[in-house]
Amino acid sequence: MKLYVGNLSFRTTDTELQELFSQAGTVDSCRIITDRDTGQSRGFGFVEMSSKSEGEAAIAQFSGKEVDGRALTVNEAKPMEPRNGGGRGGGGGRGRW
């Protein structure tokens, strides 16, 4: 079960997050999201627990728990929505009709 973990301290590391969530069960993966340009934490991340029951236990145990002076937000991660390409949209040409 993949979990969204929000309101993290900007000092929290992947390792610290993994150690914290391993208290609720087996952590398959853990990743704090960082800014592409600066490398600084964006204050949230994702933890993948090995089973749904362990994920639910982690939500119950850590949602609202204070870590480094911040109350964590923990819930089941939602699937990533498709992104638009941004910019000017495609194909337009000036037409020669």
Image: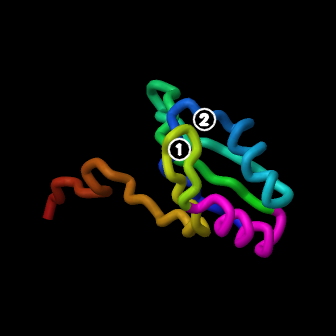
Residues at circles 2 and 1 in contact by the CB criterion of under 8 Å: yes
Report the residue at 77% width, 43% height from top.
19
Would you call the spot at circle 1 few (<14 residues within 10 Å), some (14-19), or many (20 or more)? many
Judging depth in this view, the residue of 89 and 75 nearest the camera is 75
In the picture provided, is 60 more to the left or to the right than 78?
right
Magenta-span inclusion, residue 62: yes
Judging depth in this view, the residue of 43 and 86 nearest the camera is 43
Report the residue at 58% width, 44% height from top.
67
Look at label 1 and name its amino acid: Leu
In the picture provided, is 22 more to the left or to the right than 76?
right
> Could you say where residue 38 lies in the image, as x and y percent from the top left?
46, 25
Residue position for label 1: 8
Q: Main secondary structure of the magenta part?
A: helix
Magenta region: 50-63
Which dot marks residue 12? 2
Q: Is mark 1 on a helix, strand or loop?
A: loop
Judging depth in this view, the residue of 93 and 18 nearest the camera is 18
Report the residue at 79% width, 68% height from top.
54
Magenta-span inclusion, residue 41: no
The colour style of the image is rainbow
Which dot marks residue 37? none
> Could you tell me how far apart the alpha carbons at marks 2 and 1 are, in whole angstroms?
7 Å
Look at label 2 and name its amino acid: Thr
